Image (cartoon, rainbow, N blue to C red):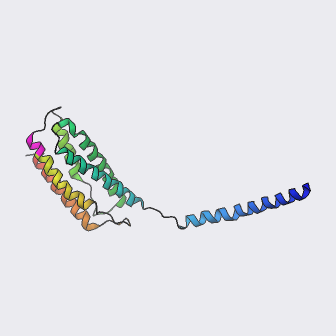
Amino acid sequence: MRRNQSRSSGKWFIVVMILLVIVWPSYQIYKLMGGNVAKEDAGRMLYEVAAFQMGLVQNALNEASTMKNASQLDAVKLAIYSANYTHDRLVKAYDNDHLKRLASLNKLLEFITSVQIAGDRSLHEEEKRILQEVQRRYGEFYEAYEQLVTGSGQLVSSEAVIVSEADEAMQELLEKQMNP
C-alpha cells in the first residue's frame, strides 16, 4: 500500500511541477504583454499631483487675504514651493515647448520673503492689496491649470498657453511691486 501512495504522490508532484513550469511563466508573459491590467501613465499621475499642489496654493492664497501678520504667510510659502517643485518636474516629464516653468511662483516666493524679512509685523494695506490681486489672478491661472492634461495624459496646448499668459501677468504684477 505504501508503494501506491508514494507513486501517486510522486505523480502529483510531477503534475504540480509541470503546471508551475508552464503556467507560471505563461502568466508572467501575459502580464508583461499587457493582459487586462490597467497601467497608469506616469505623466498623467504627476500632473494630478501638480494640480493638487496648485489647489493647495489657491487655498493658501484665499486664506492669505484674511491674514494680518507677516509670519502667518509661512503656510503660503510652503504651498507655493511644493507646487513649483512639482510643476518643474512636470515640465521635465512632458519635455514640451508649450509647457513652461512658472516664474510667477518664484516671484511670489520672493515677495512673501521680502515681506517677512522685517520680522513678525502686521501686513501693510498695500501688501494685502497685492496678495488679493495675486489671489484673483491665480484663480484664472488655476482654472486653466485644471484642464492642462487630458484623461489620457495628453497636454492641451491651448490651456498651456492660457497658463503661460496668466503666469506672465502675475509675474509682471509682482515685479512692478518689488521693483517700482
Measured as percent of width and height from the top left, residue 173 is found at 13, 51
Region of the chain picked out in magenta, as a range: 122-128
Q: Residue at x 59, y 67 (%)?
A: 30
- Tell me: 105 left or right of 174: right
Residue 175 percent coordinates (x, y): 13, 49
Residue 142 vs residue 104, the one in the foreground: 142
Q: Residue at x 14, y 49 (%)?
A: 132
Give the x, y percent position of residue 145: 26, 59
Query: Does residue 74 appear left or right of residue 20 in this picture?
Result: left
- Front residue of 102 and 4: 4
**Residue 127 to residue 39: above or below:** above
Q: Quadrant of residue 15?
A: bottom right
- Quick one: 100 or 29, which is closer to the camera? 29
Q: Is residue 124 above or below residue 15?
A: above
Q: For the point 24% across and 54% down, which residue is it? A: 102
Is residue 125 found inside the magenta-colored segment of the image? yes
* Quarter containing the N terminus: bottom right
Residue at x 70%, y 61% (from the top left corner): 20
In the displayed structure image, the side of residue 54 where residue 171 appears, left or right: left
